[in-house]
Image (cartoon, rainbow, N blue to C red):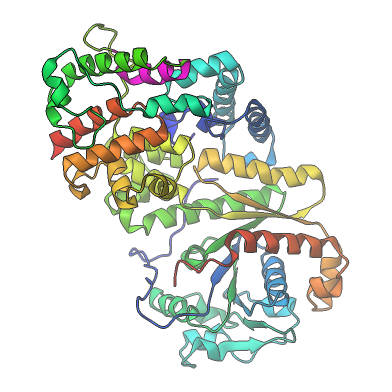
Amino acid sequence: MIFGSDQTYYDLLEVSSDASAQEIKNSYLRIKAAYRKDNLALYSLHEASESSDILERIEEAYQVLHDAEKRRDYDARHAFTAPIERDEIVSIDRVPPMDTSDESDLLNPPTTDFEAPERNVAVHAPEQTSAFATSNLSELNAGTQNSKSIAADTTVATTPSASTSDEGSQETEWTGSAIRKIRETKRYSLDDISTQTRISKTYLQAIEDEAFDKLPAPVFVRGFIIQYAKFLKIPHDAAAQYYMARFKKAV
Amino acid sequence: MDGSVQMSGNKTLFEFPTSRIGSAPRRLKQIWAVGGGKGGVGKSLLSSSLALALSRSGHKTLAIDLDLGGANLHTTLGVELPRQTLNDFFAERVNHLSSCITSTSFPNLEIISGAQDTVTIANLNDEKKLRFLDSVRDLDVDYIIFDLGAGTSGHTLDFFLFSDVNIVTMLPEPTSIENGYRFLKSAYFRRLLVNKKLAPIHDLIELATDSKNVQGVRSPADLFKLVSRQKPEMAAQLKAEIERFRPKLVMNQVRTHADIEIGSSVKTVCKKYFGIDIDYLGYLDYDSTVWQAIRRKRPVLLEFPQSKLVGNVNRLIDQLLRSHGEQKSSLL
């Protein structure tokens, strides 16, 4: 409860986001037992009202996570990737096809390229960004026989804000701390990420802390974000766009 | 619990000695501390049993009695009142801490006895404490066990926090649970207070240690909320530093299965309340042979080798050595 609204249902139940149904159930029962009235372990630390509040939230989390369908929905909304087959993952790591609608784009590398020129991503004007992202990603989806999981993944960050006015509730803000949260939910340490992506831990830390002055030139940072996002299986283009817009604004 | 945390009287917080780069490699692998707030929860029994078991598995081990003023670790190990004690070190009657070491009748096991002269020791100051902690690291042993005193004095908390492995013992009794939580809470806040990375929110943390503060900060959750509101850029750092605190729990004198499960519940409750992952190391069975061994001034491990306690202690040691054992101390 300590980290309050920051906590996901997985945090509440103290399991990782890829926990099995059985693990979730065991953990739920364990926590419920701990908060049982008159449990000695609560003595002097928790007041009765706090315990019942915690039990309520645990119950709420369990109602969602133990129901396979509700859990899938929840995962999709919170950018957790449900356990999926290995070969399905490959497509998300693919370089998206180049946008050929505009002839001039042929001369530019695709956006996942570290060295991609900024003009490819309309970072300086955040309200325009989703238009690009959407067209780009819908092509990606169309071109790669998208699986359900990818669709779920990408919807999180790419709801076209221009087309709707539903207060952009689905727009994910890929701030440093949002990325950290996903990493922590997936139970990776910075060392894990560093080993896997070969990005130095100092930079990873700086990315999460948004310690922009400790980061190298934007083109490198962009590459880091993409690498890191891919590893976490979050929509890397959207994450890079959002993060780089923040980065440049601050620098 | 009233939530108050007693800090040592002086306002300035003590700083741990930092590691000295470039000095000769040390032998010391780790320092384990055993604390728990309340008296009579088995701190000395656990300390001496851990020390004895470590020494028997071939590690050169030193148990230091830091129950200043109430020292009796030497008795649990069957050592006569030693001639040199910590008091001689603090009073600067000896030059080196190693002069206070007393051998025991067990191979690989030595002790430093706590001071007998309560008056001077109660006034231990930060300078002397620093000198002690600095000297400890140079001793020619593999493992050091700190047997801490009861209570939540600043000195006891600092000895606890200085160690590599922080063990808390509790009994399945309300009084022990209450004091155990008070001890954890005091250590928790002190740890955050002395953390330089958290200097920008030092005032907010200090506020949380005062149970009567006007902002209504009563718990770690309140503190986190307050920091998120007032210094949002520090929230992630605070969370990271909180999560770095990984104390271990040993339930002592368990009689039933339900008693053992209280330990799991304590772990769960601490996760929710403090945001920390406690490592529930295990439990020690209630064992009526303990008092008999104490009366004979003999280590229970040796006096009753068939008792369940021996199995319990060996399991704890195995687990600790497996998870931490061969890593070099972060302090060195």
Q: Find residue A2 and report its horizontal and vertical position in percent.
A: 46, 37
Q: Is residue B40 visible?
A: no
Question: Main structural element of the magenta stretch: helix, strand or loop?
Answer: helix
Residue A153 lies within the magenta run: yes
Q: Is residue B54 visible?
A: yes
Relative to B273, residue B100 above or below: below
Which residue is painted at 49% across and 93% down in the image? B94
Count all numbered tags in the image, as a single digit: 0
Relative to B70, residue B219 above or below: above
Q: Find residue A216 and report its horizontal and vertical position in percent.
A: 19, 47
Left or right side of B165 for B133: left
Left or right side of A168 for A118: left
Q: Which residues are magenta?
A: A148-159
Which residue is painted at 13% across and 40% down in the image? A251
Pick the front one: A35 or B136: B136
Q: Find residue A85 and report its horizontal and vertical position in percent.
A: 53, 26
Residue B246 lies within the magenta run: no
Which residue is painted at 46% across and 52% down in the image? B244
Pick the front one: A229 or A210: A229
Relative to B84, residue A33 above or below: above
Left or right side of B275 for B300: right
Q: Find residue B77 and report its horizontal and vertical position in percent.
A: 73, 78
Quarter where residue A218 is shown: top left
Which residue is painted at 41% across and 83% down in the image? B24
